[in-house]
Every structure is written in structure tokens, then in C-alpha cells.
Image (cartoon, rainbow, N blue to C red):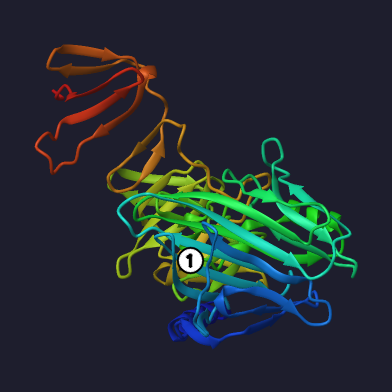
């Protein structure tokens, strides 16, 4: 008992005394070594290549927009102190602001690049984005690699076997991605191109991710893609950029604008300091007091919990169906058994998010409520309900209507700030109507 209390005190003190992470300035060229023996070099103008005894890539993921080379001209860039991700500042191309973010994964031996395109104009901008990769050696055998999960198995990557016993691999889209590149490669050539036609609405952003690295054989390259975890590739990318990815599933789950944390092999607790605790959550159920009454959810139905607010936090519990219930939990602490066996009770005031590990056969992404019968409250809470069975009675200027539920797409109640507080919009497949509902007696 004394040991458990001491562990909680030490954990709380460590949370309060940890320094805040930020960004630091680094000079170019920047060199990074990986466990595969590669020496990556990030050059001025956003160029990425290799050096050393057997540098496979002459250029990896060289970017052009509408045929124009995009070059960042600074000699110093920013680096995230916690993740090590390198950030090139804003460059301009075709009425867009472009940012490049590069992360070197020493363990897997890959360079992950994300190019973020932001449209700050008042109209939609259409551009063709092209990524080009050159290999320093001749190619013995090469070809595209098909999406193992996509419909009709579209190509999402390219692998080229070199005469020095290494295979160059460039991945231009993730498994099951809906937005696919046009990969162009001519046999015998040591260059591959991937094109993306982007349409970016006014004031919005689109991000294109790509991954470059080496394997021993082409079969190993295909196996890497099959086992690839997008959640790990993009775990250090800012939330807004993850949501903007068009050619990868970022591995993150979003319910509305909220990002749901998920564990891999363990449950995970993210503290407000940014540190993570991994282990097994001991919570059997989640009991909430909401403004619409008490709600209790079994833990096997919960994917994650988000803590909102600083002084009097409110918890959002997200279920496996994409539902979200907000309120006050019945407990002030969360019990977790760490991977080392220690048992902690962490105060919720120190917690940012809680995520359960992926269950057997479960997707990395929380199911969306789209396609289900759902009620969305003004507070942001959402819950799946049984479909309506009785006709909806509506008074209109031209008489009473009885609309069958199967003909309805949605019912949207107008805001309380408008004059028609009892109005709703009923949108049927063949017509739309705006009318007051029958007042309750």
C-alpha cells in the first residue's frame, strides 16, 4: 500500500517538473544514420539523398508543383525536440503555401516525408503534385507494388533491385487509401515518378505523405508494405496535418474534431506533459454523469477517453461505434498496471487522453457513425439509436404531412438563438421542407 502511494506521488511530481518540449534550430545539411547502415542527408531546398559507402538514393521524393521545382532556400530549419522531426518553413507555389516535414526512423531505416499544401486564397486551387525518386545505381529488376487491401489492388509503391544487394523502396500511398497516385516507371530506368492531382478548397489544407528506404529484396519490400503500420509512421505529425493526409490513413481515429488515442500491444495513458504510460487499464466500466442522465459503458465497448478542460475537466468517452458521451466520471483517478508490474492510480487532472489497445480483428480507426441512425447533440455528444419506425407528423403551410422514416435523410433542429426555435428541417430523398413541428401538449 505504501509503495503504491509512493509511486503515485513520484509520478505526479515528475509530471509537474518535466520541462516543456519545443523546437530548436538546426543547420543544413543534416545527417541521420539508421540501423540498416544508411546515411541519410537532408539538404538545402528540401532535397533528400544518401551518402556513404553504398548510397542507394540520389534523390528521394523530389517535389514539383505544376512542373515547377519547389525549393526551400533557408540554410537553417526547425526540429521538434521531442520527436526529432525536421520542418521546412513556408514556401510558395501555384497560389499555395507548402511546408515539408521529414522524420528519420533509425530503427526501421526509413525516411518519412509529409508535404503540406495550404490554400489561403478565397477560391479552390487545382494543382498537379509530382514526386520523383532517382537511384544512384542501375536497376536489375523493378516494378510497382500493389495495395494488399485496396479494391482491384492498385499500385501504391515502387521497388527497384540494385546490383549492390539492396532494393530501393518508395511508398506513395497507404493501404486502403482512396486517393491514389499515378506511378510512372519505365523498365531499365533508375527513376520513378508519382503524380497526385490535388483540388484544395479555399482556406483548407491537403497533405501528401511518402516513405523512402531500402530492403534486401523486392519480396521484403512487399512484406514491409503488408505489415506497415500507418499509426507509427505518422505518430509525430501534428493533429491538423494528420487529418489533412489524402493518400494515407494516419492510423489516428477522429470523432468529429477529436483525435482518439489507441494503444498497440498495451493500453496507453497520455499525460498533459506529453509523456505516455503503457500497461493494462483496470477500469471495468466507465460511469458518467451527463446533463441527460447517468450513462455507464462497459470497458470492452470503449476505445478511448479524452479529458477536456484544465481546472474542472470534462471527460469524453468514445465507443467502438463512434459514439461520444460527455460528462463527469464517477472517479477522480485511473488505475493502470504498468508493463513492469507497478500499479498506479493517476489523477485525471494530470491526464490528457486514454486509449485502449487494439482488440483482435479491430481496425486502427474508430468506426464512424455515418450510415447509422444517430443523434448528435449541440454539446457534441453523439449516440447511435434504433431507427424510427412510426411516421413523422409535420405541420406545414399547406397542411399536415406524415413522412415515412425510410424517406428521411436527417432531421436538423435550428439553433436556439434563431426566431424559430421549434423549426426543423426534414430532408427527404425527393423533397426538402422547413416547417414547425407539432408542439408537445
Position of 218 relative to 404 (above/below)? below
Identify the residue position indicated by label 1 in the image.
Answer: 238
Q: Would residue 426 be found to the left or right of residue 297 on screen?
A: left
Corner quadrant of residue 45: bottom right
Q: Would residue 38 be found to the left or right of residue 27 on screen?
A: right
Q: Nearer the viewer, residue 311 or 433?
A: 433
Corner quadrant of residue 53: bottom right
Task: Point out residue 139 in the picture as x, y percentages from the top left corner.
Answer: 85, 61
| Mark 1 Cα-neighbour bin, 10 Å: few <14, some 14–19, many ≥20 | few
Q: Which quadrant is the N terminus positioned in?
A: bottom right
Q: Which quadrant is the C terminus positioned in?
A: top left
Which residue is located at x 57 percent, y 47 percent? 300
Q: What is the secondary structure assignment of the residue under circle 1?
A: loop
Which residue is located at x 68 percent, y 47 percent? 360
Position of 409 relative to 355 (above/below)? above
Task: Point out residue 120 in the picture as x, y percentages from the top left corner.
Answer: 34, 60
Amino acid at each position: 500500500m505504501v509503495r503504491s502511494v509512493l509511486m503515485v506521488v513520484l509520478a505526479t511530481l515528475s509530471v509537474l517538473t518535466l520541462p516543456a518540449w519545443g523546437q530548436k534550430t538546426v543547420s543544413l545539411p543534416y545527417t541521420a544514420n539508421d540501423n540498416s547502415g544508411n546515411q541519410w542527408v537532408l539538404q538545402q531546398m528540401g532535397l533528400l539523398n544518401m551518402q556513404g559507402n553504398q548510397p542507394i538514393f540520389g534523390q528521394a521524393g523530389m517535389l514539383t508543383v505544376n512542373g515547377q521545382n519547389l525549393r526551400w532556400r533557408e540554410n537553417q530549419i526547425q526540429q521538434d525536440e521531442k520527436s526529432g522531426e525536421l520542418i521546412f518553413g513556408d514556401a510558395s507555389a501555384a497560389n499555395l503555401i507548402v511546408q515539408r516535414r521529414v522524420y528519420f526512423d533509425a530503427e526501421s531505416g526509413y525516411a518519412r516525408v509529409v508535404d503540406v499544401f495550404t490554400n489561403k486564397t478565397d477560391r479552390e486551387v487545382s494543382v498537379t503534385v509530382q514526386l520523383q525518386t532517382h537511384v544512384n545505381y542501375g536497376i536489375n529488376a523493378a516494378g510497382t507494388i500493389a495495395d494488399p487491401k485496396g479494391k482491384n489492388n492498385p499500385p501504391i509503391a515502387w521497388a527497384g533491385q540494385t546490383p549492390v544487394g539492396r532494393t530501393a523502396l518508395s511508398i506513395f500511398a497507404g493501404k486502403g487509401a482512396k486517393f491514389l497516385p499515378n506511378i510512372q516507371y519505365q523498365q531499365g530506368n533508375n527513376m520513378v515518378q508519382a503524380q497526385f492531382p490535388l483540388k484544395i478548397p479555399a482556406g483548407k489544407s491537403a497533405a501528401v505523405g511518402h516513405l523512402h528506404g531500402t530492403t534486401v529484396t523486392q519480396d521484403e519490400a512487399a512484406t514491409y508494405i503488408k505489415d506497415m503500420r500507418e499509426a507509427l509512421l505518422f505518430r509525430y505529425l501534428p493533429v491538423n496535418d494528420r487529418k489533412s493526409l489524402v493518400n494515407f490513413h494516419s492510423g489516428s481515429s477522429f470523432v468529429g474534431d477529436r483525435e482518439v488515442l489507441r494503444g498497440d500491444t498495451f493500453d496507453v495513458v497520455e499525460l498533459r506533459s506529453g509523456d505516455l504510460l503503457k500497461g493494462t487499464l483496470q477500469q471495468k466500466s466507465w460511469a458518467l454523469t451527463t446533463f441527460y442522465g447517468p450513462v455507464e459503458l462497459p470497458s470492452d465497448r470503449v476505445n478511448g477517453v479524452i479529458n477536456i478542460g484544465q481546472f474542472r475537466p470534462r471527460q469524453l468517452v468514445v465507443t467502438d461505434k463512434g459514439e461520444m458521451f460527455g460528462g463527469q466520471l464517477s472517479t477522480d483517478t485511473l488505475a493502470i498496471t504498468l508493463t513492469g508490474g507497478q500499479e498506479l492510480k493517476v489523477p485525471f487532472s494530470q491526464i490528457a487522453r486514454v486509449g485502449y489497445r487494439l482488440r483482435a480483428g479491430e481496425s486502427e480507426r474508430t468506426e464512424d457513425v455515418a450510415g447509422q441512425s444517430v443523434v448528435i447533440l449541440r454539446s457534441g455528444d453523439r449516440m447511435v439509436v434504433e431507427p424510427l419506425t412510426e411516421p413523422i407528423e409535420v405541420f406545414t403551410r399547406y397542411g399536415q404531412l406524415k413522412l415515412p422514416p425510410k424517406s428521411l435523410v436527417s432531421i436538423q433542429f435550428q439553433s436556439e438563438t434563431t426566431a424559430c426555435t421549434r423549426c426543423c428541417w426534414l430532408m427527404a430523398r425527393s423533397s426538402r421542407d422547413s416547417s414547425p413541428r407539432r408542439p408537445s401538449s
